[in-house]
Amino acid sequence: MKKFYITTPIFYPNSKLHMGHAYTTTLSDILARYHRLLHEDVYFLSGSDENTQKMIDAARREGKEPLLFLDLIVENFKSLYASLDISIDQFIRTTNREAHWPGAQALWKKLVEAGDIYKKEYEGLYCVGHEAFVTEKDLTDGLCPDHGTKPEFLKEENYFFKLSRYGDTIIEKIESDELHVIPQSRKNEILSFLRTGLEDVSFSRPRKSDWPDGLGIPVPGDDSQVMYVWCDALANYITALGYGRDDELYTKFWPTDVHVIGKDILRFHAAIWPGMLLSAGIPLPKTLLVHGFITSGGKKMSKTLGNVIDPEELINEYGAEAVRYYLARHVSPFEDGDITREGFKEAYNGNLANGLGNVVSRVMTMAQAHLNDTVVTEINTLPQEFLNAMNAYKVNEACEMIWKRIGALDERIAVEKPFALIKTDEVAGKRIIEELVREVYLIGCTLYSIMPKTSELIKAAVRENKKPENLFPRKE
Ligand code: ME8
């Protein structure tokens, strides 16, 4: 059995997840389900990145004890995942001392053995928003352009990782697609970055006295330092499989087939992470699928602009299946995408209430009225065009193909009018209805990874030869 290991980034639990995080996670879930449909042995990982200063700051702003604050936010992450039907096999938390710390420390020791960790006095600017050191040239008027905050000046003794040693090898692996960066535009972007030369990176921070016990992974052999959060976080992809602790899943599933990430964290995944793996002698990920950013009304979602779209709100109003549909079809996996409430409603009414919902209801109403038996439906393979699009991660194109078929079905009913024909030529009328039902069933099957519940309802309606409940009530 072919295996398929897919991951999302582990998100920062400093606030609730928004539509961007919902996008990454839904896209990953669609791919995980698709590969299960192909009878592959799938492992799907997600989690939270918890050993961070920004989480502590957020907890303090809310007057909560950090570890309690973490538990509350993580509950919230998990409840969003449950509403969206995200089929993860594991949710890894980087404060988990049993699941995560032993592997992260084992990996650190490998880097030490390779001679790639050294101590150095360091001075520089640190952006808490990015959880990364930044330089003057990254700033606009002295502020981080992404977070609008002034970076802290730090002078401290840290352990460094000799990332500079691995630049050439990483370039080779990416050029040859041994580490396949998708889409091509992101591959070009990271290659030109790598060609400017990689510097060594600070890989630890002095343990802060105000961090609670249980937060921050101690550097092996030096308790006064904790691992730099990105070194700790990237390790999750192997620690969750039991690396350095219990190798069964690790042996079976590593290397990962796809890390799904947003464009903001490309450098961490296509420079630091491969560097760490090369140093430790661990095989590299096969694919990095780098998606764009979701904006709202053409602008970055921001509380001040009032254009933040909360996935929970949309789910409450339209249902999770509609949210999954929208993200799958109306956001390209390779480019930035835009969501507005008006656009969402239009897509819902046009393509779910009127499109899919209506066509299934029309066909099954005819079937229920005129066919005595369930139409025999045997689907051995999905349309090649659909498989090709999904294999190339073009989930939006796969959806286009499905909706083209939905449109064609509608058209056929309008042109051939089986409901009228059946009155004059019963045999011919029934034959057409049977064909329509088969097509509805096929559409139901192709929808499985995108809208799992809708897919089940459609297939059940065909099996029971009856009209399903109203799948997508129109919104006025
Ligand atoms: O970076 N549009 O966590 P994070 C689309 N903990 N996707 C978006 C988005 C938007 N507007 N905003 C965020 C971290 N994302 C680290 C990751 S992994 C070892 C550690 C998604 O909570 C997108 O996937 O800031 C992006 O890469 C990720 O959330 C960043 O999540």
Image: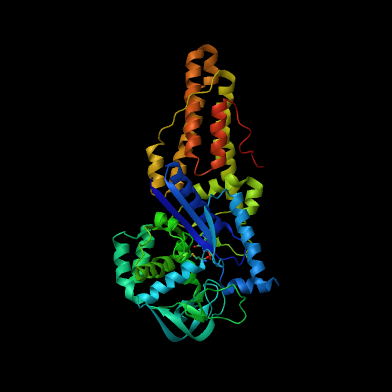
Residue 156's spot in the image, x, y percent?
A: 50, 86
The colour style of the image is rainbow
Judging depth in this view, the residue of 55 and 124 nearest the camera is: 55
Judging depth in this view, the residue of 141 and 270 nearest the camera is: 270
Residue 78's spot in the image, x, y percent?
A: 60, 56
Judging depth in this view, the residue of 215 and 264 nearest the camera is: 215
User: Looking at the image, can residue 104 be seen?
Assistant: yes
Q: Quadrant of residue 354?
A: top right
Height in image: 233 above or below 121?
Answer: above
Image quarter in which the N terminus is found: top left
For this orientation, the residue located farthest to the top is 424
What number of labels is visible?
A: 0
Image quarter in which the C terminus is found: top right
Height in image: 291 above or below 66?
Answer: above
Q: Residue at x 48, y 21 (%)?
A: 432
Residue 272's spot in the image, x, y percent?
A: 40, 70
**Left or right relative to 288: residue 130:** right
Residue 422's spot in the image, x, y percent?
A: 53, 16
Q: Residue at x 53, y 38 (%)?
A: 455
User: Looking at the image, can residue 331 be seen?
Assistant: no
